Structure formats: C-alpha cells, structure tokens
Amino acid sequence: MPKDPVCGKDIDESGARASTGQTAHGAAEVDPNMGTRSFHNGQWYYFCSMDCRTKFLASPNTYTG
Amino acid sequence: MDFAYTPEQQTLREEVRQFIAEYVTPEILAEVEESGVRSRGPKTREMYQKVADRGWIGISWPKEYGGQGGSRIDQYIVEEEFGRVGVEVGGAGSGAPAILAAGTEEQKKYFLPGLIRGEISFALGFTEPQAGADLAGLQCRAVRDGDEFVINGQKMYTTRAHSGSHIYLMARTDPEAPRHKGISIFLVPMETPGITVRPLWTIQNDPPAPRRTTYGDRRTNEVFFEDVHIPASCMLGEENTGWYVGALGLNLDRVGASRYLLSVQRDEDIINWVKENDMGGYGPSQDPAVRDRLAELWIEAQVCRLMTMRSMSLVERGGTFTYEGSAEKVWAPEHGVKTTETIAQILGAYGQLLSSSEDNIEGGVFAHNLMGAFQSGINHGSAQVMRDQVARRGLGMPRG
Ligand SMILES: Cc1cc2nc3c(=O)[nH]c(=O)nc-3n(C[C@H](O)[C@H](O)[C@H](O)COP(=O)(O)OP(=O)(O)OC[C@H]3O[C@@H](n4cnc5c(N)ncnc54)[C@H](O)[C@@H]3O)c2cc1C
C-alpha cells in the first residue's frame, strides 16, 4: 500500500482510483474524499489531501529522498 | 463607432425577449438552478435547440460552419438578454475563436456546428497544480507515438470537465525547447480512456449559489491523464505553437457580453432592490450616501460596456486585438468586487443571508455574489496576469 509521502498515512490507491460514476460525456469520476495525486518525474504520487500535496509540490526532493 | 443600436438590432432584442418570456419557463429556470448555470439538463437542452433553430447561436461565425455570418453586436444582444435571466447560451467562452483561427478545415467542420447544436462544449484544460499564473511552467506531457500522442499529467480547476464533451488541453510536446515554445493544444474527447475527473467544490457550493449569481462556479475539477492515447489530428494549430494559439483563443474568447453583464447586472439588482424596499424605516433610496455610491457604480459599469463595445468593434473590423480583452478582464471583476462590497454595506446583515436561509433576499444572490466576486478576479486569467499583458502588449514593456 503506498504512503502519503508528506504525512506518512497509508493510501488506499485502488480506492483513490476507483470510478464512482461517469461525467456527462463518459470520463471516470473519482471520490474526492479518497485523496488526490500528482504526476511527478514520470510517476504518480498519492496524497491523503490537497494540503499534503501542496507541501510536496513546494519541495518534492524533501519527500522523494 | 456608432454607439446606437440599429432598428434591426432593437427588433432582434425584442424578439429575444419575447422568446425568453415564452420558452424560458419556470421549469427551465428551476433546472438551471439545480444543475448549475454551466451544465445543461434535458429541458434546458430542448430550449437551447430552439435558440439554435432561430440562428441565435454563433451568429457571427461563418455560414459554412453553421453560423450566420452576422454581426458580433447581434450575438452580443442575444447573449446579454439570456445572461440577464441567468441562462448561458453559446458564443463567448466557447473555444470557437481559436478553432476558427488555427483549426484545420476538418476541425472547423466538426467542432463549430457541434458547438452551435450544443452537442459539443469545452472544458479549458490549462491550469495545473504548479502552473497557474505562471502557465508556461506546465508539465502535462504529450509524447508523439506515430500517428498518436500519449498524454500523462494533470490539470486543475478545470471547470467544465464534468459536463463538457471535450477538453481544450494545453500540454508540453517539447520539454527541451524554451518554455513557451514547447507547448501544443489538443482538443480531446472526455470519453477517451485514461481520463479521470475529481471534483473540487468551491465556496459557491454549500449552500448552492442561486441561478442569477453572476460570479463564480460551484464546481471545478482536477483531471488526471494516464497514458491517454489520442490521434495526432486532435492537435489544434501547429505542433509547439500552442502557447500562441492558446493566448489568441483566450483573448478572443473574452469578447462578448459576459464582462459587461458581470459589471452591470449586480448594479441593476441593487438599484432596483433599494428603490423597492425599506429596511425598517430606513429608506435607502433617499439616503444621499446610498444614491451617491449607486450612481458611481452604474457610471463605472458603463466604462465596462464601452470596453466591451470597443473589443467587439475592433474584432469585427479585423483590427489588432491584443491587450484590450485583458484590460476588460481587469476592470469588470474589480468593479464587481467594489460593487459587492458596496452592496454589503448598504444591505447590512440582510446582505449576508445565503440561499439556504428561509429569510434570504432575492434568493441569496447578494450574499453569494459577495463570495463569488473574488473568484472572477482569478479564473480565466488573474488580475495580475492581465495587468502584465496590458504592460507588455499595450504599453510595449519587455516580458518581466
Ligand atoms: C472558480 C475558478 C474556476 C477556474 N476555472 C478554470 C478552468 O476552467 N480552466 C483552467 O485552466 N483554469 C481555471 N481556473 C484557474 C485559474 O486560471 C488560476 O487559478 C489562475 O490562473 C491563477 O493560478 P493559481 O490559482 O495557480 O495561482 P498562483 O499562480 O499560485 O498565484 C496566486 C496569486 O498570485 C498572483 N501572482 C502570481 N504570480 C505573480 C506575479 N509574477 N506577479 C504578480 N502577481 C502574481 C496571481 O495572480 C494570484 O492572484 C479557475 C480558477 C477558479 C478560482
């Protein structure tokens, strides 16, 4: 299970990606309560919240080691 | 420039008003209220079709692509009348100007009639978590693979991603090139596999902003692209010219009724309210301070109207149109903030009753506009970015 690189919480990746429905024109919708993500250096990082993601984006090297 | 409407234009306005009285029924208004101004429910789509049948969508677009080859002022009149009742009909903000300017023949033939019929609508996929005001820092990648491009990355605050048929996507096609020169635009169907939408709810969501709120959006979105394969024919304009195509399109998309309406509709609402209401023995329409402030606001709104007319006139005559739309985009939202602050002062606590309050006035529109006014100085280009464009394109200053 991936961890939020900022706060260290376990992330339910499949939950974050699970489709909860479709937009009016057929794109998958996801549950906003399952956290968010970011595509960074060719890889997806998952976060429990936007709050953690903004910290990550301010200083990715701090969190990617 | 002739500031008066022609007799034909006056007639058109009357026809539009009659149409609205007949077809924009309370049921449709309730549906708009329910689904949000920018998403169309089934009844609204039916009504929209009638508007299209009358030739009122894309009036100024060329006939060969389903438009009427008519004047922008006519289009403005239609947009203004519908805007006043809180119903959005095509035209400005549609993405059409960029397609007309940079699209292939095939793209024009496909997208423009679709926009007119209301079957196609675009979400604007520019902003990313780290590329907002500094848009040229965008990282969403589109990599060529034969006749296709493969997209990976994400967009943020993509307002119509949940309701639009396509996303008007800005992505990096050459990471080695200078920042502004390695970007391309793609018109991507939302149904393409690998696209995921995550709602981002704004201050206008809970309680929901009423229909006649002229500022802001209830819902915007994050959009994720994971190995999204699209044909190379989705590209708008030449590869790596997306920065310029995008800037031109955004600028031209600003030409229309929406800014002036944003400015004047709130003024008119409060002026009417003040004339018709008395807050416990305090008759605000007789209060010299209130009269002074409202007259000033209304005069300022007329400045915005003149800016709008100038933009339309310039574009109609094929003149260079560079900083004028940006100037309008600064003036109208800032006037809006001032208006809502003044309204808050005049109405006192009444002005803070939201749509969810049984005691709200005018459906809570004043309270919601107070919150939403600040959105309009950020979305579709923030005030600082717009001023910078005026400095560069209007005043000839170098890039900062
Ligand atoms: C309701 C809403 C709807 C939106 N819809 C869309 C949409 O549909 N599609 C889309 O692509 N985007 C959309 N946006 C995003 C919008 O375009 C951006 O929010 C905007 O470009 C600013 O970017 P930012 O929020 O990342 O702010 P930042 O770039 O983080 O900037 C924060 C503030 O600092 C100011 N600032 C930044 N740099 C400078 C500078 N050099 N000099 C002076 N001031 C500066 C900015 O103007 C802003 O006020 C929407 C935004 C909102 C609020």
Image: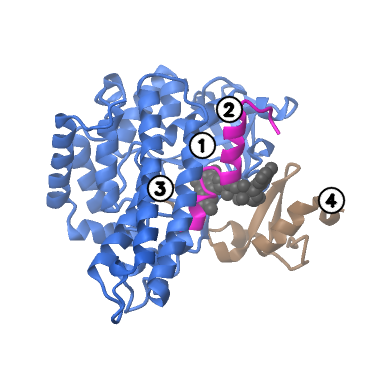
Check disc 4 and report the residue beneath it. Answer: A61
Mark 2 vs 3, N-terminal side: 3
Q: CA distance from mark 2 to mark 3?
A: 24 Å
Q: Amino acid at mark 3?
A: Glu
The shade of chain B is blue
Classify mark 2 as within 8 Å of ligand 1 or not, answering yes or no: no
The quadrant in which the C terminus of chain B is found is: top right
Q: CA distance from mark 1 to mark 3?
A: 17 Å
Check disc 1 and report the residue beneath it. Answer: B326
Asked if one can make out residue B313 in the rendered structure from this viewpoint, the answer is: yes
Q: Is residue B289 left or right of residue B221?
A: left
Q: CA distance from mark 1 to mark 2?
A: 10 Å
Check disc 3 and report the residue beneath it. Answer: B300
Q: Secondary structure at mark 1?
A: helix
Q: Amino acid at mark 1?
A: Ser
Residue lying farthest front?
A: B288
Q: Is residue B13 left or right of residue B308?
A: left
